[in-house]
């Protein structure tokens, strides 16, 4: 199976680098670098795109409130097998997280001692920007991108400070509490000319002020909330049901998971952010409101990273006859998410090489709540999102896995 690439060294600065998704991604690249040809789960691995960084040429750093090196962190997450931990162990152990900007007000479920105690919002932005500069220099990377893989933050209110760049700058100056860590990281990335991808449901570059900033600075941004399991299945099934004129009477979705992300979602405010991105998908694809569309997420510690997503779909067919579809997706959350984070980083870097800043809608296929540039409704149907990305990449028809 061919690896696409150009010999371009790409630095990936990860917010939440000690988490299960990030450590799985870093370990995966190390296993590939050591000669593995198992590229399952990497949707762009079969493509040869001029300028796109090779997986083996990716290097990593980042921030985390837990200061443990990535080998210790990966061991605690229990996603990787013993053989994979052994193979990637030295590379993981060599990466120790930089002190992170955090906020108990925005993410009550996650804390740690490896925290940068910022004197102000501007001080936090300077610290993040300095880390990016040092990372670029030490890694000798030709390009650097930032990917947010941190735990879900609560949503701030619809505050005027987030509506325009001028208002946001003033809010930074007065340390306005409406600005959370995800927005500070996104602002620092854009200010530093570093493409930014938000794999979380947290408000960041999708705030109108930061979209404006990215467009002004011509820096690629994309997000939000990685589409890995249940919602990915929903965006495949719903268009098919619509194409067959099968009416969706109700759709009940529930998830149980026991990893660090699940623990963060025990906080009702963080959970509300997650449910918002998962819940707005169905109606737009079907073209009508599904009144009984219910989504439930529960933290269940024994499962760890082995998430279970269960869907019950009630449909009506010809002559009003009722039918049901049951989907039980027993998945590994980080195994699904990690390769998508890698692909997002590679495409964002390619967009910057092409001089295309602002919102990168072609990355919609990777997100539950895709950002759009001009205020139109996002596309959610998986097959249409995939075509959008392939067309942007310039890939031949039928190239995607």
Image (cartoon, rainbow, N blue to C red):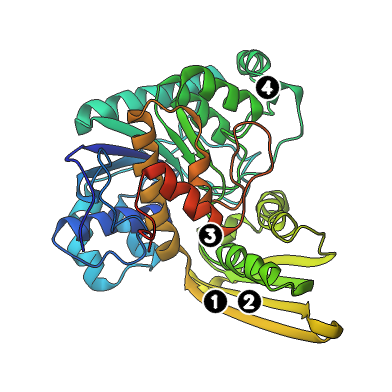
| Displayed quadrant of residue 237 | bottom right
Between label 4 and label 2, give the one nearer the viewer.
2
Between label 4 and label 3, give the one nearer the viewer.
3
| Residue drawn where x is 82% and y is 59% of the image | 289
Q: How far is disc 4 from disc 1 in space, using C-alphas?
A: 42 Å
Q: Are marks 4 and 3 in contact (CB under 8 Å)?
A: no
Return the x and y of residue 86 as percentages of the image width and height: 20, 66
- Whether residue 161 is situated above or below residue 156 in the rendered picture: above
User: Which quadrant holds the N terminus?
Assistant: bottom left
Q: Is residue 119 visible?
A: no
Secondary structure of the residue carrying tag 3 is helix
User: Which quadrant holds the C terminus?
Assistant: bottom left
| Residue drawn where x is 23% and y is 30% of the image | 142
Q: Which residue is mark 4?
A: 176
Q: How far is disc 4 from disc 3 in space, using C-alphas?
A: 41 Å
| Residue drawn where x is 21% and y is 30% of the image | 138
Number of other residues with Cα within 10 Å of mark 2, as a class: few under 14, some 14 to 19, many 20 or more: some
Between label 1 and label 3, give the one nearer the viewer.
3
Number of other residues with Cα within 10 Å of mark 4, as a class: few under 14, some 14 to 19, many 20 or more: some
N-term-proximal mark, 4 vs 2:
4
Q: Are marks 1 and 2 in contact (CB under 8 Å)?
A: yes
N-term-proximal mark, 1 vs 2:
2
Q: Which residue is mark 3?
A: 383
Q: Which residue is mark 2?
A: 310
């Amino acid at each position: 199976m061919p690896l696409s690439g150009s010999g371009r060294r790409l630095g990936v600065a990860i917010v939440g680098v000690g988490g299960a998704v990030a450590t799985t991604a870093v370990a995966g690249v190390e296993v590939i670098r050591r000669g593995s040809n198992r590229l399952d789960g990497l949707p762009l691995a079969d493509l040869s795109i001029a300028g796109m960084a090779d997986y083996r040429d990716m290097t990593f750093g980042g921030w985390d409130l837990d200061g443990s090196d990535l080998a210790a962190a990966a061991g605690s997450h229990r996603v990787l097998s013993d053989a994979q931990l052994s193979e990637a162990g030295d590379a993981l152990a060599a990466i120790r997280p930089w002190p992170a900007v955090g906020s108990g007000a925005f993410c009550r479920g996650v804390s740690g001692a490896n925290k940068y105690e910022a004197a102000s919002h501007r001080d936090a932005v300077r610290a993040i920007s300095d880390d990016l500069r040092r990372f670029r220099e030490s890694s000798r990377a030709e390009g650097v991108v930032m990917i947010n893989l941190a735990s879900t933050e609560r949503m701030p209110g619809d505050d005027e400070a987030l509506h325009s760049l001028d208002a946001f700058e003033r809010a930074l100056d007065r340390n306005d509490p409406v600005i959370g860590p995800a927005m500070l990281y996104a602002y620092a990335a854009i200010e530093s000319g570093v493409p930014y991808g938000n794999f979380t449901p947290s408000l960041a570059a999708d705030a109108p002020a930061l979209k404006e900033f990215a467009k002004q600075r011509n820096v690629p941004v994309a997000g939000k909330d990685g589409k890995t399991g249940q919602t990915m299945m929903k965006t495949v099934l719903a268009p098919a049901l619509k194409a067959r004129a099968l009416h969706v009477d109700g759709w009940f979705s529930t998830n149980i998971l026991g990893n660090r992300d699940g623990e963060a979602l025990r906080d009702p405010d963080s959970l509300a952010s997650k449910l918002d991105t998962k819940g707005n998908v169905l109606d737009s694809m079907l073209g009508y409101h599904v009144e009984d569309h219910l989504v439930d997420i529960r933290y269940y510690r024994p499962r760890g990273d082995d998430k279970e997503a269960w869907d019950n779909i009630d449909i009506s067919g010809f002559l009003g006859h009722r039918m049901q579809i049951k989907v039980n997706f027993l998945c590994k959350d980080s195994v699904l998410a990690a390769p998508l984070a890698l692909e997002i980083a590679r495409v964002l870097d390619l967009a910057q090489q092409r001089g295309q800043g602002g919102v990168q809608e072609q990355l919609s296929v990777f997100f539950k709540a895709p950002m759009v540039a001009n205020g139109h409704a996002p596309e959610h149907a998986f097959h249409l999102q995939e075509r959008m990305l392939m067309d942007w990449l310039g890939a031949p028809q039928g190239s995607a896995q």
